[in-house]
Image (cartoon, helix red, strand yellow):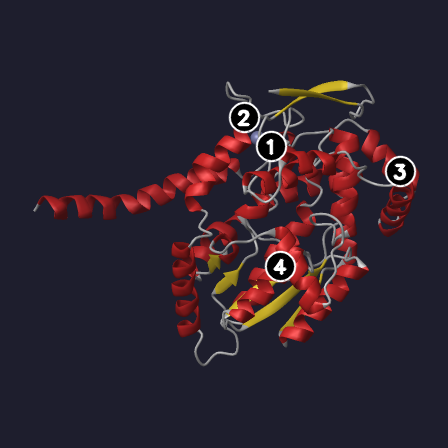
Amino acid sequence: MSIITQAWSPDGKVRAYRMCSRCVMDTTDPAITFDKDGVCSHCQRFELQIKPHWKPTPDGAKELEAIVAAIKAEGQGKRYDCIIGLSGGVDSSYLAVKVVEWGLRPLVVHVDAGWNSELAVKNIEQIVTKLELDLVTCVIDWEDVKELHLAFLRAGLANQDVPQDHAFFAALYRYATDAGIRHVISGTNYATEGVLPQSWGYDAMDATHLRAVHRKFGTRALNSFPIMSFFKYYFYFPKVLKINVVDPLNFIPYEKQEAIDYLEANFGWRYYGGKHYESRWTRFMQAHYLPAKFGYDKRKAHLSSLIVSGQMSRDCALAELAKPLYTDNELSEDMAFVAKKLSITVEQLEAFIAEKPRNYTEFPTNALQVKWGLRALRLMRAPRWLFNKLLARR
Ligand SMILES: [Zn+2]
């Protein structure tokens, strides 16, 4: 068990945080627990709940081969057999390369919520040009994005990426439906995302939450912001349209540094310095807003993911954590950039950060809908279960 003392915390006081003996997660996650050896609940969850489903093995490769063959067979005669989202980041860029390597014919969708870094735009161009893929860019109404960002900032919530992430998935599913594509190939993966504390954010797909925050802190109606309702997300897309989401990076050995090296050597792609930093908004949120307002340093979760998946040593992660989140110049530049984009002053932005943080539980969520939805699903399955049971007795 290790105790480390950090000089920073949201209130400026020096505090001691208990850190996991295996990864670099610590008690800045209020829900973290430790076993007798000082190993944290995230490490335990990875071993017990994630590892059994993570298959970077020959068996996983065979399983993926069968999935790819089925997608190809279904897509015969169609222009596209699947859809992928491309942010310009490592995971989605590498996924695009692999998808083409496997012989799939994806429609590529990029959702532009107004925060693309120049590098992200160049990376996207390089990937689609060299792979000769069709790209559609969905530009979200900037006034809507700004309205929602300001509502979430006034609300003082941790997950300020909700509007951006929600729009991404809603737009992707909309394009899939319009193009008659049933298979969504996702870059979500256990290798680089196996550790992510729930207390540091909240589900971006909860439309009830998104609307509730906007109702309380918004100033005007939204124009055309794509919202994925509870019904669409949990029932219409998966059950009626049978949209199938595949996470192929969980079936192959996927190492972040190898992926970066491969993309840089073969596609003129360039790394932008941190997970999700392809968006200037997310970079500001992760490198300043979250640490300054809540004491959350998301690098701890990202680095811990690499540790538990065997891609990085704990010492190496500690050395990374010792580096500053921002240099002074970068912080003041991003601060000015974000404030200008949101049509507020730097002082107003600083005031949002200084105000009391709020937890997502202080706002309505879809928790009740999920509870009753699951009960309804169980009831719908009950007659089939009873029928099978009776059949087995005969
Ligand atoms: Zn741990």
Mark 2, ligand 1, within 8 Å: the answer is yes
Quote the CA–CA distance across marks 4 and 2.
Answer: 31 Å
Residue 242 percent coordinates (x, y):
42, 61
- 3 vs 1, front mark: 1
Quote the CA–CA distance across marks 4 and 3.
Answer: 34 Å
The local secondary structure at tag 4 comes to helix
Count of marks, rendered view: 4
Give the mark nearest the N terminus, 4 or 2: 2
Q: Which quadrant of the structure image shows residue 320?
A: top right
The local secondary structure at tag 2 comes to loop
Quote the CA–CA distance across marks 1 and 4.
Answer: 25 Å
Dot 1 corresponds to which residue? Answer: 23
Dot 3 corresponds to which residue? Answer: 348
Dot 2 corresponds to which residue? Answer: 39
Mark 1, ligand 1, within 8 Å: the answer is yes
Q: Which quadrant of the structure image shows residue 213?
A: top right
Residue placed most toward the observer, 139 or 97: 97
The amino acid sitting under disc 2 is: Val
The amino acid sitting under disc 3 is: Gln
Please state, as top left, top right, bottom left or bottom right, where the N terminus lies in the image: top right
The amino acid sitting under disc 1 is: Cys
Give the mark nearest the N terminus, 2 or 3: 2
Residue 296 percent coordinates (x, y):
71, 32
Dot 4 corresponds to which residue? Answer: 92
Does residue 49 appear left or right of residue 329 in this picture?
Answer: left
Give the mark nearest the N terminus, 1 or 4: 1
Crowding near pointer 3: few (<14 within 10 Å), some, many (20+)?
A: few
- 2 vs 3, front mark: 2
Image quadrant of ligand 1 equals top right
Quote the CA–CA distance across marks 1 and 2.
Answer: 8 Å
